[in-house]
Image (cartoon, coloured by chain):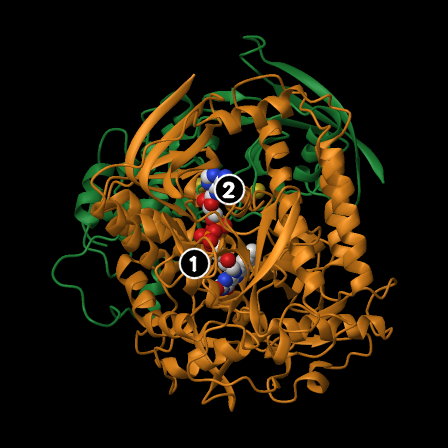
């Protein structure tokens, strides 16, 4: 039995981006938020370090410097008009959160305190600047909590544990979405004038990752299957400091507070790679530096496969006040006391710079120029593109707030401009029914977890920090083979209620699709830029590759096209720190 | 690699009205979380085993459950600290829906009832509201809450009286009552003065022991009681 609902605006996802959008859309149009997790379980809550805005509360700063840092940090692949919007609106975005009740850390004068963060500088690269607004090392937790509290206050309507599995289009216009209700196994069709995707990232294509088990790229996968392109998917960020083997993130704020990376000789090796910013250089540089040290035999431990994050020279009171959570992670998961012992770390798959292409009002593009009427995307699922080839730390919490807000406003405005809903296509839930049927009745000769593990292993080995034509081809072939095996998976749980096994199988399908897009996009980019490093093409090539990748689904293949980069003030120059 | 036994409380009303215990032998590595072992069962031994999880490092609050008789987050407790035979049950006091997954709605209802959002009057300032570092520190502890429900479902009062708000809702109220920017203290205190409010608390400290975020839950409840008696925050 399929149930039908009608709303003006439907928001898919209740992380920071989804709830920020809901607060705007919900006060202007009849809005429902569909989320596969209870809102407060969203991975925005895991963000630690902070959210940048040129408040200039503790030292001179201005949003133009922030824009420059964002553009340079993104290795000039950033759309500069979008970065200007984000960095200008950053100030109000932070102040809005404070007014909603977010308990930021304070300066002695009672203002919002700010600290240093990787790649954020004074006056176009002179020195590190204190720009990140934070609440200890649980900034994301408090953003998520605060936005949820505001949603409760404003009576936003949530459908919790509803998994959106399909987007409904009719004649190229948005008609609604199809969702699966975890509690009952029933399908629901939501007809809506505007749909906004805010489903977050897809870190689970990798094995060592800071991302939650539930970050499986559903939103990207859904629109891609419906013929909408994905932009710049080859740009995936590896954060330098994940807990060794586990991937749990230790915020860059640890280095902002003075933490130092050391190799097996105890050397502060970042001095050699980034003489000015050292340990606070952007993430792509630091992650490569770590692997270069490891490859040169200067890794730590018996397998020489990690380096150390050293906090031992910082006063325990400072660690307790500013980094309580991450020091606790070290104690809980490694049995290490950060007051006295360095913490073993390695780069961890962290953030998708790419995603669903949008303009600065979160409107989704169907190609390089045209929008899909009624369709919006914001947050990690989207590519505006404000992060270009490499996102700066703290710019995602900013992105979700600025573009979540803009997206919510634009979605409501679109809905209010339409007299009628777009008619639903025939048999709207048919595709989803067929997919679930196949997974339920599949022979079960193949195991979901085994395929997922194999995918993650090949992605870690062949498509992570260092890439070559050969490694990427290996990954591509492996993914192909896994997609064939995926056809034969089946689930053992025959039940209708809370069938999480069935949903894990669906999620794996999205992961396989997105891994393929990532690898195919990476194969075609014969240069190194930001988070995409090709050992066979180790330099940036602005002549041929100063352009966004647009990946389209074609049958079981991926077809690539391009989109120009928007440049306003800043000409590409060499990126040194 | 060693083997441990997970003894898990199973329940699926689609199959039977009765809950039962089922044991699984699971290979574990040193450093594995209980969540890793549960995943091993789900992924390789019995796909129907049902539980919630997301972040896997103790920040999202999805996977609170009773482990060897006490409430824990499965992702924040290591197998090596649990012995060779580990019993795993759903949280007590909330209706079990399937295996280790409980109905969270009553818990969120209590949360919503205490008006968990900043209340202010007058026009908002152009810049941020000022707050001294000391005033900010006053309610720091209760801002850590991840709404995992470990405290509320460890509380014997809550087990026997599902109308009681439970510790988490009081923690939430505390977070706002002691925030110098907030003006809703009176309203919230009135709600908590109710017969199902703070006065039901018998200071058993179960909640404090259960909290995976190390929040001094009982202390927060005591502070709210004191605020009621002395009418100030
Ligand atoms: C450990 C960690 C630390 C970080 N620290 C920082 C930091 O300090 N500063 C910074 O700027 N950035 C940081 N980031 C990045 C930043 O936190 C994320 O990029 C950002 O929070 C993503 O927010 P979001 O709203 O887009 O997605 P999420 O918060 O991931 O939310 C996704 C939502 O989509 C829903 N959803 C997903 N699929 C479906 C579906 N099929 N149907 C229905 N709902 C669905 C989920 O339920 C969830 O509510 C960090 C990231 C990690 C992992
Ligand atoms: S107070 Fe602690 S135990 Fe209770 S819900 Fe919050 S985090 Fe969980
Ligand atoms: S899975 Fe998030 S708290 Fe355990």
Residue A480, x across and y down, in percent: 75, 44
Q: Which circle marks residue B174 in the picture?
A: none
Mark 2 = which residue? A226
| Residue B199 sits above or below residue A125 on the image | above
Residue A101 placement: quadrant: bottom left
The residue positioned 84% from the left and 74% from the top of the image is A298
Residue B112 placement: quadrant: top left
Q: Which circle marks residue A358 in the picture?
A: 1
Left or right: residue A548 versus residue A174 is: right
| Residue A64 sits above or below residue A549 on the image | below
Left or right: residue B43 versus residue A64 is: right
Q: Is residue A499 visible?
A: no
Q: Is residue A271 visible?
A: yes
Name of the residue lying farthest toward the front: A171
From the image, state the color of chain A. orange
Residue A164, x across and y down, in percent: 47, 36
Residue A154 placement: quadrant: top left
Q: How many C-alpha atoms fall within 10 Å of the one at disc 2: few (<14), some, or many (≥20)? A: some
The residue positioned 61% from the left and 58% from the top of the image is A560
Tag 1 secondary structure: loop
Q: Between marks 1 and 2, how big is the CA–CA gap?
A: 16 Å
The residue positioned 45% from the left and 74% from the top of the image is A566
Sequence-wise, the earlier of marks 1 and 2 is 2
């Amino acid at each position: 039995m399929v149930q039908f609902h009608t709303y003006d605006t439907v928001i898919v996802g209740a992380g920071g981006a989804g709830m920020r959008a809901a607060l705007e859309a919900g006060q202007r149009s009849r809005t429902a938020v569909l989320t596969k997790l209870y809102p407060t379980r969203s991975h925005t809550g895991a963000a630690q370090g902070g959210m940048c805005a040129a408040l200039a509360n503790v030292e001179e700063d201005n949003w133009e410097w922030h824009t420059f840092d964002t553009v340079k940090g993104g290795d000039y692949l950033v759309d500069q008009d979008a970065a200007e919007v984000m960095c200008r609106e950053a100030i109000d975005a932070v102040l809005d959160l404070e007014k909603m009740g977010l308990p930021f850390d304070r300066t002695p004068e009672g203002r919002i305190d700010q600290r240093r963060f990787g790649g954020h500088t004074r006056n176009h690269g002179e020195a590190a600047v204190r720009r990140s607004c934070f609440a200890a090392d649980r900034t994301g937790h408090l953003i998520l909590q605060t936005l949820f509290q505001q949603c409760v206050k404003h009576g936003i309507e949530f459908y919790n544990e509803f998994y959106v599995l399909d987007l409904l289009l009719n004649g190229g216009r948005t008609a609604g979405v199809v969702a699966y209700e975890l509690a009952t196994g029933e399908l629901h069709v939501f007809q809506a004038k505007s749909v906004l995707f805010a489903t977050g990232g897809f870190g689970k294509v990798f094995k060592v990752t800071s991302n939650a088990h539930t970050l499986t790229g559903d939103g990207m996968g859904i629109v891609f299957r419906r013929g909408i392109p994905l932009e710049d998917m080859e740009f995936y960020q590896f954060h330098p400091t994940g807990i060794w083997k586990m991937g749990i993130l230790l915020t860059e704020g640890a280095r902002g507070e003075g933490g130092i990376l050391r190799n097996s000789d105890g050397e502060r090796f970042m001095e050699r790679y980034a003489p000015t910013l050292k340990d606070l250089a952007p993430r792509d540089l630091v992650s490569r530096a770590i692997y270069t040290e490891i490859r040169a035999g200067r890794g730590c431990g018996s397998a020489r496969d990690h380096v150390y994050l050293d906090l031992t020279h910082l006063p325990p009171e400072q660690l307790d006040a500013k980094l309580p959570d991450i020091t606790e992670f070290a104690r809980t998961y490694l049995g290490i006391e950060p007051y006295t012992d360095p913490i073993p770390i390695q780069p961890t798959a962290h953030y998708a710079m790419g995603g669903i292409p949008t303009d600065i009002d979160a409107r989704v593009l169907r190609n390089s120029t045209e929008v899909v009427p009624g369709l919006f995307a914001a947050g990690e699922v989207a590519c505006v593109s404000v992060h270009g080839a490499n996102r700066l730390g703290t710019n995602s919490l900013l992105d979700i707030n600025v573009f979540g807000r803009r997206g919510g406003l634009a979605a409501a405005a679109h809905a209010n401009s339409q007299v009628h809903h777009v008619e639903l296509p025939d048999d709207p839930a048919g595709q989803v029914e067929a997919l679930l049927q196949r997974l339920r009745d599949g022979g079960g000769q193949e195991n979901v977890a085994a395929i997922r593990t194999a995918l993650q292993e090949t992605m870690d080995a062949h498509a992570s920090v260092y890439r070559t034509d050969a490694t990427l081809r290996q990954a591509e072939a492996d993914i192909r083979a896994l997609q064939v095996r995926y056809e034969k998976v089946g689930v053992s749980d025959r039940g209708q209620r809370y069938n999480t096994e069935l949903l894990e199988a669906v999620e794996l399908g999205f992961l396989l699709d997105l891994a393929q897009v990532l690898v195919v996009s990476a194969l075609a980019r014969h240069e190194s830029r930001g988070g995409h490093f090709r050992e066979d093409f180790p330099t940036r090539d602005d002549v041929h590759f100063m352009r966004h990748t647009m990946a389209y689904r074609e049958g079981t293949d991926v077809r690539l096209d391009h989109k120009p980069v928007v440049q306003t003030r800043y000409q590409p120059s060499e990126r040194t720190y | 690699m060693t083997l441990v036994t997970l003894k898990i409380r199973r329940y699926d009303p689609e199959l039977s009205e009765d809950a039962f215990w089922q044991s699984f032998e699971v290979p574990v590595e040193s450093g594995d979380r209980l969540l890793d072992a549960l995943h091993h069962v789900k992924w390789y031994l019995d796909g129907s085993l049902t539980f919630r999880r997301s972040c896997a490092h103790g920040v999202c609050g999805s996977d609170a459950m009773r482990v060897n008789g006490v409430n824990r987050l499965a992702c924040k407790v290591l197998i090596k600290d649990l012995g060779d035979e580990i019993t795993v049950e759903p949280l007590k006091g909330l209706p079990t829906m399937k295996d280790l997954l409980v109905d969270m709605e009553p818990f969120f209802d209590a949360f919503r009832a205490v008006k968990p959002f900043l209340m202010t009057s007058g026009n908002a300032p152009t810049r941020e509201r000022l707050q001294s570092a000391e005033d900010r520190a006053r309610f720091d502890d209760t801002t850590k809450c991840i709404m995992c429900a470990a405290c509320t479902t460890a509380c014997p009062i809550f087990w026997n009286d599902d109308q009681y708000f439970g510790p988490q809702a009081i923690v939430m109220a505390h977070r706002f009552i002691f925030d110098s920017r907030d003006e809703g203290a009176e309203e919230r205190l009135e709600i908590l003065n109710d017969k199902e409010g703070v006065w039901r608390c018998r200071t058993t400290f179960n909640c404090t022991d259960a909290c995976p975020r190390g929040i001094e839950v009982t202390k927060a409840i005591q502070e709210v009681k004191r605020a009621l008696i002395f009418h100030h925050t």
